[in-house]
Amino acid sequence: MSGRARLALCATVATLCAAGALLPLVDPVSWMFQAAALLALMTGAGALARRVPLARPLTIGVQVLVAVVLLTFLFAPGEAILGLVPGPDAVAEFGRLLRDGVQDVGRYAIPAPVTPGIRLLLVAGVLVIGLIVDAVAVTYRSAAPAGLPLLALYSVAAGLSQGGADWLWFLVAAAGYLLLLLAEGRDRLSQWGRVFGATAGPGRPDGRGLPLGDAGPAPAPVRTGRRIGALALGIALVVPAALPTLDGGLLARTGGGPGPGGGGGTISAVNPVVSLQDSLNQPVDKEVLNYRTTAADTRDLYLRIVALDHFDGASWKPSERTVTDVPDRLPEPAGLGATVDRARINTSISTAGWYAQNWLPLPYPASRVDISGRWRYEPQGRTLVGDRGQNTRGLQYQVESLQVRPTARQLATSPAPPEDLLREYTKVPDSLPGIVRSTARQVTHGASTAYAKAVKLQDWFALYGGFTYNTDVRAGSGAQAIARFLTDKQGFCVHFSFSMAAMARTLGIPARVAVGFTPGTKQPDGTTSVSLRDAHAWPELYFQGIGWTRFEPTPSRGSIPDYAYQDTSGPDGAGRPAPEPSRARTPSDGPTTAPSCGPGERRSDSGATCTALPAASGARPSDDGTSPWAAAALALAALLVLLLPTVPLLWRLRTRSRRMTQAGADGDGAAATLAAWRELLDTAWDFGILPDDALTPRNAAARIIRIGELQPEAAAAAHRVAAAVEQVLYAPQPRPATGLALDVQRVRAGLAAAANRGIRLRAGLAPRSAARLRWACSARWASLLLRFRTSRPVASVRRATTALRPGRQRA
């Protein structure tokens, strides 16, 4: 194996070693085999292109072309031309897959399922890094900078897992990089011939070491390189871990806290919030979990995943909290008084085999959880979160929980919360738009208690504010997202819950957002099925004596709890009729069969069916695909990228055709002869014989014959063309020459017969004489610049600027 081929193999291995850090992020790992196969094919294409040899940019272009064809064959064969060439449909399919992949990355917790979009991101990402590493280390022969893309690939994995990438994967990636450095060093040393060691090899009494590739001890320079690499790797690992100013060093592991019995640590999940918009808009609804419960009425049995209590003005997210081991019995909910009615229920839950989430869906508030696996308990949110890769895939667990049933009067007479809780859960950033605070005050005008303000906010969103439920509206981010929602009045549960919680905080009411599932749909076998479209978000407001209390501001979703209908006998409700309930007020004798209404539907008064909402006026159409103009532009851009490497070849073919046509015409003898001579010189250049302008035509032809090893017939043709050129250039009355085009063709055929396959491929696919195109473009550009600089307006400006310089002005 040649040195450059060995270096290309090591570059591929180093890329795959670094890509190994991505394996814990997804399940299954079958994508890695596809990425390895495609990377090997792309690397092989680069090796062949270098063997031809092609110019360095053309080599990279060939690899890009091969990568595009391979990705098209793997991900969009039905939309491609002949299953390989990407057309407009294939480009649109790639755009859809990339868009879905980015959304899936934000939607799933680690380890995420390998959806088609995620698979494309992984495979294409490995190919891009592999292409960069191969280009830098092999094509441009500089292996050291190739560590940067390898580090970037590892850093992506470590960043997505928030430091949870196992240190073993770093060692694997580092070993791949060191292997690449050693291969480059060995290749460089081999170019100097035999390498001599410091000691004599076996059977070499003269002290000569063994050459590279022979059996025996490694040469001294190679051993030194290995020692330096091992020392550098050791320093990279040990120094960050030893410095007191750094947080744990490279080998530190985060996110799990200590193991069982540790009783401490913190949890900051990668992305605990399921992408609600994607779940609600799935074309095929899938069951997430099902459960059996002893609850008499399941309409309030929301399955809560996580509480979002940190609001920075742009988004809601869970705070980083201390976690502990899961106690046998969870403590009583904070703030729940003894006088509040409650019922204890038991629920048996089974999750789907594909559903992988760090946070465990639980009825709120849970009192006891019987579950196997590595789980930790976060007391503030009363949630369970997986530790060291634990997730919800295919679980069965039992939950004992409370159904808290406060009355409207108890909520209305609730005392003020503790000062520390009030201070933490009413924080709003200064960047919050003023419309949020002013709208909250306007909506709750006349309400004297926190409960009355909460009910008015809920009713304004769900009943009286003119809002429309629409899952096609973008969730949005940034400080202006809530302001846009309050103006446009279109959105889904994320908009309603986030906005109501933020407005409640501006009114001094402690608030946070809960994410989970609505109760689901009753099944004939007595279980209740919860699907993707039951994904939901709702606000929780704190009332002293009751605790964290659910409200439902989203129209046509979930159910408004009984306590959220304001008691009209009090001062806040005097003279105002109670809002018409969206479900039956009296609890049923058994579990409900009422489904969770979907987008564009509202629950009927009986609560048993869903009815379609009237079409909202002014609703904006959803963007259901890529614009045809955008698809055409992408297709054109892809076509230009594919055609760019062929520009030199096309230019050379056009130039040859023009010259041969001119040489075959007998009308203008001088022009025809010179055209044939230029074509002969460029043909020899294509086969590796550089033109020498210092030689006479006769000597130039003899040089081409000698280097190109032409046979007598081709040699005679070259001499005839050279003699015709000398007649044109030096004879007083040149004799006309005929058949020059055929002579040039004979010379070309002779050069091709004497050359090896690599030279012939290079001459046909990447002709060296195409350098004239680059020279012509450079000359044209220089001419344009000179013309621009010497133009009258520019010259006038230059003279005026020169006149204004200090020292040029007259006193």
Image (cartoon, rainbow, N blue to C red):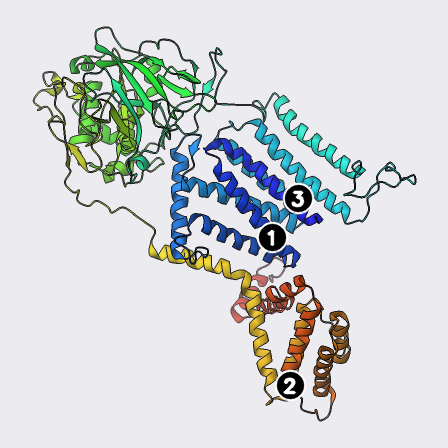
Q: In this view, does 81 lie to the left or right of 519?
A: right
Disc 3 residue type? Answer: Ala
Residue lying at the far right of the rendered structure: 206
Q: Which quarter of the picture shows residue 308?
A: top left
Secondary structure beneath disc 2? loop
Q: How crowded is mark 2: few (under 14 residues within 10 Å), some or many (20 or more)?
A: some
Decide which of 89, 432 is in the foreground and name it: 89
Which residue occupies 64% across, 38% down?
177
Residue topped by disc 1 = 46
Q: In this view, does 350 lie to the left or right of 569?
A: right
Which residue occupies 39% across, 37% down?
104
Compared to residue 22, the image places residue 680 above or below, namely below
> How far apart in space, not on screen, are marks 2 and 1 (Cα)?
41 Å
Q: In this view, does 562 lie to the left or right of 117?
A: left
Residue topped by disc 3 = 143
Circle 1 or circle 3, nearest the eye: 1
Which residue occupies 35% across, 36% down?
477
Nearer-N-terminus badge (1/3): 1
Q: Which quarter of the picture shows residue 269?
A: top left
> How far apart in space, not on screen, are marks 1 and 3 (Cα)?
16 Å
**Where is residue 629 shown, x and y percent of the image?**
35, 57
Disc 1 residue type? Answer: Gly
Residue lying at the far top of the rendered structure: 338
Q: Is residue 578 left or right of residue 13?
A: left
Nearer-N-terminus badge (3/2): 3
**Where is residue 604 shown, x and y percent of the image?**
12, 30
Circle 3 or circle 2, nearest the eye: 2
Compared to residue 698, the image places residue 468 above or below, namely above
Nearer-N-terminus badge (2/1): 1
Residue topped by disc 2 = 739
